[in-house]
Amino acid sequence: MASISSSSYKNYQIRNRNPNPKTSVLLVIDMQIYFSTIAKPILPSITSTIQTCRRAAIPIIFTRHCHKSPADYAMLGEWWNNNLIIDGTTESNLMPELERREEEMVVEKNTYSGFRGTGLEERLKEMGVEEVIVTGVMTNLCCETTAREAFVRGFRVFFSTDATATSSEDLHIATLKNMAYGFAYLVDCKSLQDALCL
């Protein structure tokens, strides 16, 4: 995806805050082989963000979108003409470039939300998490839905501008505007590194 002009969403970015590494978690949303065309351009940013969080001892949770049978397609089946990610296929696997570590959690989901029916909220509360940093794909679908749901569940949300991506720049920018206006503090690789003093 082409580089995003910050001026397109800066007017809405009036709140600034740094994440607290002691109470944060990094969510890496749906960086799967199925989405590789969209995801590959942001791999440098997302791997940098992952490395930054590892150095800061911030836990990392990956989500993996997949469907096990038509019984769990719900509205996604209708909306996407049943062209969905089927569990057990190569396309459902996380991209190997992420180099996920064995101890890093993977949450499976079958809708846009990382929270619905996944137990994620309970896990985060058990971990003492108060803040989530959202990265991954697609900016305007699973990343945005998960960020909004985190916000309404009482988590402080940080949303990456350069470690998220979607199918078009317009959709990406629209989400960044929405996030900055009502749901999340916007961050990028450099601002995270600076905030965490790394």
Image (cartoon, rainbow, N blue to C red):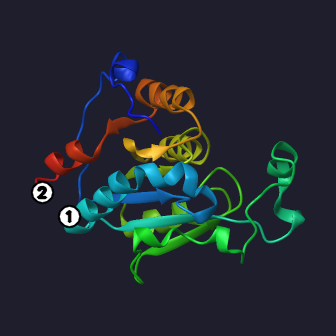
Amino acid type indicated by mark 1: Ala
Instruction: Tell me which corner region of the image, top left, top right, bottom left or bottom right, holds residue 2.
Output: top left
Secondary structure state at the residue bearing disc 1: loop
Q: Residue at x 80, y 49 (%)?
A: 76
Characterize the local packing of mark 1: few (<14), some (14-19) or many (20 or more) Cα atoms within 10 angstroms: some
Q: Is residue 130 visible?
A: no
Q: Residue at x 70, y 54 (%)?
A: 111
Side of 75 relative to 24 (left or right): right
Q: From what the image shows, is residue 70 above or below residue 18?
A: below
Asked if marks 2 and 1 touch (Cβ < 8 Å), the reply is yes
**Number of marks present in the image shown:** 2
Extreme bottom residue here? Answer: 102
Q: Residue at x 89, y 64 (%)?
A: 70
Extreme top residue here? Answer: 11
- Residue labelled with disc 1: 56
Extreme left residue here? Answer: 197
Q: Report the front residue among 32 and 52.
A: 32
Side of 107 relative to 53 (left or right): right
Q: Earlier in the sequence, mark 2 or mark 1?
A: 1
Side of 91 relative to 121 (left or right): right
Amino acid type indicated by mark 2: Leu
- Residue labelled with disc 2: 198
Mark 2 vs mark 1: in front? 2
Q: Is residue 194 visible?
A: yes
Q: From what the image shows, is residue 52 above or below residue 89?
A: above
Where residue 163 appears, x then y in whole percent? 39, 48
Q: Report the front residue among 76 and 45.
A: 45
Side of 15 relative to 180 (left or right): left
Where residue 17 appears, x then y in whole percent? 24, 37
Q: Residue at x 38, y 58 (%)?
A: 26
Secondary structure state at the residue bearing disc 2: loop
Where residue 45 appears, x then y in whole percent? 33, 51
